[in-house]
Image (tube, rainbow, N blue to C red):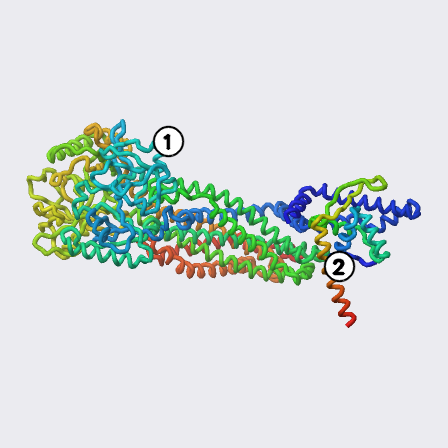
């Protein structure tokens, strides 16, 4: 078997040698035969001619010996292939068009698939990832909020469904560096976190069970990339110490390169979450998220039910802190891929549709060529080519085309992947760490091979089917041309209708996504984002007293306000358009506590609203001298007023915080039009704003400076950063940026932008391809009907009649395509539902606009061939036949 | 003259193996021997013989090498391999079974 393979290959690649071998063997045979005959007494002439007669044609012998091995079949294939390449080269226009179209289609599909593969197919880097779940607490604002340390302990003790329940807090550390403190991405986890995930360090050790207790020395694991880039990748890293948020911490291990944990990424340092901070002792201080591994045999629903049971117990047991809260759980896979899965599936569907259009287009090109080659086939058939040999010629051409386009498509995809990765903002990429695995791996190569194979099958079967044996005889007859043309026209028309319908679906998808992206960027955020810049400040060292904190903030206001180009400055706990976190419970004084009383709370400086240019609905905003010596005041937003003071005037009412903070109640002095605290596409949330001067906090707790500028924000930002650093060198300044940037680069805007752009480019390509397809069909149909048109015109038909005839044909195709496309869009856009923002899937303006665009494109595509038809010279047309 | 390729392809190969079982031979020698032994019934032309030899060689039943002939010319001599010997025995046994079966049918 092996030997046969080797000999066969050798024969194939050393054709000449093999032929020479056969020839010399044949010569020997001849010589021996002649010798033998001479021995028997024949004359030398007689002997030679007798021997020659015996052997027959040397060529026949050679062919027979050749066909004894398998290589002869391969040789025929090679011949076909050479012929196929020659055919394709002879017709460079056809070959280039077909290959270009296919390359685009395959490249787009492979690119999207590589992302689908990285996100949805490659397993997450944990042991049995499907058994892992994220545990949150729900509150009145939504289902995904933090647990407090004490709640987490209770969930851990009381549950019967988890083999382990760990917790993590995804806020970073301040790393001490020679240049002062620097904020670094990090996560605090309880000791069993990595054991629960089933991940072990590649270097050093995991946390020991007691490492997260208050008495234990501080230890941390680092990510692989932090090890390489921050610490130089040396093995002596284990045991080195760093100062993280003021604690001297030993590095005990390095995590594997493949490890990522999207809910806490990006994270360089993984420290321990220990109950020695102030927050961990207060049940109402929520700062953790749970990570659970389900007990074997326990289903997700049963586990959730058990967690909810405990949540209910806690709410009853601790009404002060856990009132209105409950447990929610998501499978870890959903927590990681939740937002990206529908997008990827939609893009994959879009790419598949585009590929389908490309395939249809190339098929119709191939069909046209098949029609043109009917005579060639007929002649070859008449000269004795077996029909299987003729079909195999088509097979080879189709395969050559598909394989060539597949290879080019793979290269194109490689470029596209890099382009797409480069277009995703880094912050957003950090939330999708699995995307790092995107590339041309085995799965992607297999996918490319599969797509190429399918394309090859379609392209070779389609023309082969059209050249059935019965057709061959007709092919020689001139008359049959018209008839086969009719058949082709019917077939080609169907293909074009399918193309137009698909293009319609993609255009509608792109239109809806584009509209939704526009709506998202122009959503009413309750503030004027133009010229607004923000800067985060954080620190490690707690110094001073409350009056000192207040005067420090006043100093920041004064110094930054004096910078050229700064119109106004203010300070807030957290800037708008963030994650919408940071909430507390409140009560209305004089009323019984209501359910669902958790609202967003922000401590802001007096000029906050005027800096944001937020709109006052009633009452007034804060005055700068409203400090702890004065009546405590609060501004609520319109949403809170709507929810908790329906039909009454909230101004003048008193509210108080519920969570143990039993200071005097606050007087509602104003209502502000709702400012979007969460992502641009989040529902408006109830929020209250308190003056910082009445609720001072130390600078090291961190705050955000909001600047309204009249000139370029970037120069102002860097000056503001140095001013803050000069005022207090222990503070670190990070994430300078503009509010427009924040809006534009927010995860939800990025998702919308990415999907709108990608589906948009698919749709543009689809439109182009389907219009070219329509043009091809109409043009070919005109060329087949030249004689008919000539006859009509000879019989008195006007040019306008011919125009109308051709345009009606094209218009009919376009109409059917558009109507089918509308029906298809209705089905397809339901897939988009989740991705749309303030746009209905059945958006009449989009559908109408797309139909018009498609109709105009179709009109243009058919106008050229119609003009050619109308300019037919009847006498020439009749002569030509 | 029966055209052996149509006759039974396997039969020719078996006859070639049998011929080579005695001595290594070159192509013409094999054809000559078959013709002589069969009293001129089988006259094998190179168009049938060479492909058969090629197939046998490919299957590892014979091997070939260039040698000088008795007339001091170069020729390809074919020689039975162990596998060829085994194949010959098997084919022979099968052939005998078939022949006796056919004979029984014809004489029944």
| Dot 2 crowding, Cα within 10 Å, few <14, some 14–19, many 20+ | few
Measured from the top left, where is residue A537 in percent x and y? Answer: 22, 35
Which subunit holds the residue at mark 2? B
- Asked whether, in this view, residue A154 is left or right of residue A23, the answer is left
- Asked whether, in this view, residue A22 is left or right of residue A365, the answer is right
In the rendered image, residues at marks 2 and 1 fall on the same chain: no
Measured from the top left, where is residue A785 in percent x and y? Answer: 60, 58
Whether pointer 2 and pointer 1 mark residues with C-beta atoms closer than 8 Å, the reply is no
As drawn, the residue found furthest toward the bottom would be B108
Q: Nearer the viewer, residue A766 or A116?
A: A116
Residue under the point 14% across and 40% down: A692
Measured from the top left, where is residue A379 in percent x and y? Answer: 70, 55
- Asked whether, in this view, residue A614 is left or right of residue A79, the answer is left
As measured in the structure, the alpha-carbon distance from the residue carrying label 2 to the one carrying label 1 is: 75 Å
Residue under the point 58% across and 59% down: A488
Disc 2 target residue = B8
Disc 1 target residue = A234
- Asked whether, in this view, residue A732 is left or right of residue A792, the answer is left
> Mark 2: which secondary structure?
loop
Q: Nearer the viewer, residue A870 or A311?
A: A311
Residue under the point 69% across and 48% down: B60
């Amino acid at each position: 078997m092996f030997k046969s393979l080797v000999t066969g290959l050798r024969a194939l690649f050393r054709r000449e040698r093999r032929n020479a071998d056969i020839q010399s063997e044949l010569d020997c045979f001849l010589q021996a035969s002649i010798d033998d005959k001479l021995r028997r007494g024949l004359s030398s002439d007689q002997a030679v001619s007798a021997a020659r007669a015996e052997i027959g044609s040397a060529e026949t012998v050679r062919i027979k010996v050749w066909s004894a091995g398998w290589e002869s079949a391969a040789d025929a294939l090679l011949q076909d292939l050479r012929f196929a390449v020659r055919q394709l080269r002879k017709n460079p226009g056809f070959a280039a068009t077909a290959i270009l179209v296919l390359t685009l289609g395959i490249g787009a599909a492979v690119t999207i698939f590589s992302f689908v593969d990285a996100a949805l197919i490659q397993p997450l880097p944990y042991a049995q990832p499907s058994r892992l779940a994220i545990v949150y607490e729900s509150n009145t604002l939504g289902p995904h909020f933090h647990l407090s340390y004490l709640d987490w302990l209770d969930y851990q003790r009381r549950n019967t469904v988890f083999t382990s329940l760990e917790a993590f807090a995804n806020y970073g550390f301040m790393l001490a560096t020679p240049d002062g403190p620097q904020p670094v991405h990090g996560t605090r986890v309880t000791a069993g976190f990595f054991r629960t995930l089933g991940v072990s360090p590649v270097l050093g050790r995991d946390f020991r069970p007691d490492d997260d207790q208050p008495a234990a020395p501080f230890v941390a694991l680092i990510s692989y990339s932090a090890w390489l880039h921050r610490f130089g990748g040396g093995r002596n890293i284990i045991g080195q110490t760093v100062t993280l948020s003021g604690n001297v911490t030993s590095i005990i291990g390095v995590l594997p390169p493949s490890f990522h944990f999207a809910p806490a990424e990006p994270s360089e340092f993984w420290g321990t979450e220990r109950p020695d901070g102030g927050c961990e002792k207060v049940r109402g201080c929520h700062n953790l998220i749970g990570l659970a591994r389900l007990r074997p045999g326990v289903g997700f629903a049963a586990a959730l039910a058990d967690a909810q049971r405990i949540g209910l117990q806690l709410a009853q047991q601790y009404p002060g802190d856990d009132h209105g809260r409950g447990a929610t759980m998501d499978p870890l896979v959903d927590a990681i891929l939740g937002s990206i899965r529908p997008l990827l599936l939609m893009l994959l569907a879009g790419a598949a549709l585009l590929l389908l259009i490309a395939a249809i287009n190339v098929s119709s090109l191939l069909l046209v060529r098949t029609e043109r080659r009917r005579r060639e086939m007929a002649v070859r058939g008449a000269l004795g080519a077996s029909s299987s040999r003729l079909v195999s010629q088509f097979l080879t051409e189709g395969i050559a085309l598909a394989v060539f386009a597949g290879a080019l498509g793979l290269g194109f995809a490689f470029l596209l992947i890099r382009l797409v990765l480069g277009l995703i903002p880094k912050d957003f990429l950090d939330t999708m760490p699995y995307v790092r695995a995107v590339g041309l791996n085995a799965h992607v190569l297999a996918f490319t091979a599969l797509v190429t194979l399918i394309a090859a099958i379609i392209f070779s079967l389609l023309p082969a089917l059209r050249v059935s044996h019965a057709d061959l005889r007709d092919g020689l007859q001139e008359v049959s041309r018209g008839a086969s043309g009719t058949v082709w026209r019917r077939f080609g028309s169907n293909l074009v209708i399918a193309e137009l319908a698909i293009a319609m679906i993609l255009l509608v998808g792109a239109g809806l996504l584009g509209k939704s992206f526009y709506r998202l960027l122009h959503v009413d955020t309750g503030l004027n984002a133009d010229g607004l810049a923000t800067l985060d400040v954080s620190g490690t060292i707690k110094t001073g007293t409350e009056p000192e904190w207040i005067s420090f903030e006043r100093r920041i206001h004064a110094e930054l306000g004096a910078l050229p180009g700064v119109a106004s400055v203010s300070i807030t706990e957290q800037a708008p358009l963030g994650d919408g976190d940071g909430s507390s419970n409140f009560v209305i004084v004089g009323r019984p506590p209501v359910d669902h009383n958790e609202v967003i709370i922000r401590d802001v400086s007096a000029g906050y609203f005027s800096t944001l240019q937020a709109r006052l609905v009633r009452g007034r905003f804060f005055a700068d001298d409203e400090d702890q010596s004065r009546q405590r005041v609060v501004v609520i937003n319109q949403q809170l007023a709507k929810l908790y003071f329906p039909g009454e005037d909230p101004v003048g009412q008193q509210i108080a915080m519920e969570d143990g903070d039993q200071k005097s109640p606050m007087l509602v002095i104003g209502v502000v039009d709702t400012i979007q605290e969460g992502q641009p596409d989040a529902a408006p949330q109830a929020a209250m704003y308190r003056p910082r001067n009445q609720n001072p906090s130390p600078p090291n707790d961190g705050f955000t400076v909001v600047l309204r500028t009249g000139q370029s924000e970037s120069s102002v930002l860097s000056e503001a950063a140095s001013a803050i650093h000069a005022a207090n060198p222990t503070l670190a300044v990070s994430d300078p940026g503009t509010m427009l940037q924040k809006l534009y680069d927010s995860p939800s805007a990025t998702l919308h932008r990415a999907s709108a752009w990608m589906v948009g480019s698919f749709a543009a390509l689809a439109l182009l391809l389907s219009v070219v397809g329509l043009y091809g069909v109409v043009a070919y149909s005109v060329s087949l009907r030249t004689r008919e048109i000539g006859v009509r015109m000879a019989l008195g038909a006007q040019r306008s009649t011919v125009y109308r005839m051709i345009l009606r044909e094209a218009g009919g195709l376009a109409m059917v395509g558009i109507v089918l496309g509308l029906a298809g869009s209705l089905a397809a856009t339901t897939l988009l539902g989740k991705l749309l923002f303030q746009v209905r899937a059945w958006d009449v303006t989009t559908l109408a606009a797309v139909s018009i665009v498609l109709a105009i494109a179709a009109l243009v595509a058919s106008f050229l061939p119609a003009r050619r038809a109308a300019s037919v010279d009847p006498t020439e047309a009749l002569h030509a036949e | 003259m029966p055209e052996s390729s149509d006759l039974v392809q396997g039969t020719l190969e078996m006859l070639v193996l049998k011929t080579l079982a005695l001595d290594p031979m070159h192509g013409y020698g094999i054809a000559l021997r078959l013709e002589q032994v069969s009293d001129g019934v089988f006259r094998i032309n190179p168009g049938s013989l060479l492909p058969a030899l090629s197939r046998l060689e490919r299957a590892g039943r014979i091997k070939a090498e260039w040698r000088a002939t008795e007339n001091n010319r170069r020729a390809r001599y074919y020689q039975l391999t162990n596998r060829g010997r085994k194949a010959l025995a098997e084919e022979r046994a099968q052939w005998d079974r078939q022949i006796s079966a056919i004979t029984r049918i014809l004489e029944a």
